[in-house]
Amino acid sequence: MRACLIALLLAVPAAASNSTAPAPDFRLPTLGGKQLSLGDLKGQVVMINFWATWCGPCRQEMPLLEGIYKKYKPMGFTMVGVNVEPDSKAAEQWLAKQGPVSFPIAFDTDSKVSKLYKVTGMPNSVIIDRKGNVRLLHRGYKPGDENTYLDQIRMLVKE
């Protein structure tokens, strides 16, 4: 029984992994018509959250991300929501109905940035340190996962 449990635990992919690889730079259009470049955010702790309107956990997580953004923004933290749908109108309509978020929303309509970050499902979050290195990759969302984000963000804003 013990051997089966160990084998099962080893077979389940981790929801989060730590890394220190340089974050791939990108430029995407944003809600409001501007361009957002990750390179322009160097010097800040950045959380990129890949999401879609059809993703239930994404919709559940969005208000929590807004709260994290508002709390940690004064400490040099920023959040970027990257919508991965081919048509950004669905995201614009959902955000208007849901209540707009105050952090930037970018549109990856051709999935180029999602591929750079090896996004395989929704939601997917990446936390990047002030030097531009990926420090956390987190796949999926379930209640309580925000504590993983917060632990990482609190550590990185102090660096």
Image (cartoon, rainbow, N blue to C red):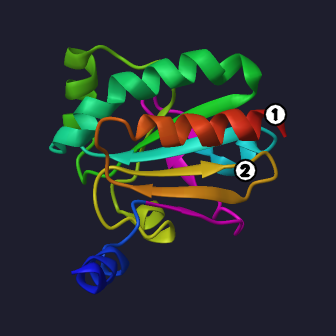
Furthest residue in direction front, as rendered: 1
SS class, disc 2: helix
The quarter in which the C terminus is drawn is: top right
**At 51% from the left edge and 43% from the top edge, which residue is drawn?**
148
* Of the image marks 1 and 2, the number of the one nearer the N terminus: 2
22 part of magenta stretch: yes
Amino acid type shown at disc 2: Gly
Which segment did they paint magenta? 16-35
**Distance (Cα) linking label 1 and label 2:** 21 Å
Q: Position of residue 126 (x, y in %)?
A: 53, 52
64 part of magenta stretch: no
Instruction: Say above or below: 23 vs 44.
Output: below
**At 64% from the left edge and 66% from the top edge, which residue is drawn?**
19
With 130 as the anchor, is 14 left or right in this view?
Answer: left
SS class, disc 1: helix
**At 53% from the left edge and 40% from the top edge, which residue is drawn?**
149
Amino acid type shown at disc 1: Lys
Residue at the spot of label 2: 39
Dividing the picture into quarters, in which one does residue 146 lie? Answer: top left
Which mark, residue 140? none
Badge 2, how many Cα within 10 Å: few under 14, some, many 20+?
Answer: few
Q: Position of residue 40 (x, y in %)?
A: 73, 43
With 37 as the anchor, is 119 left or right in this view?
Answer: left
Q: 91 or 12: nearer the eye?
A: 12
Instruction: Say above or below: 149 vs 104.
Output: below
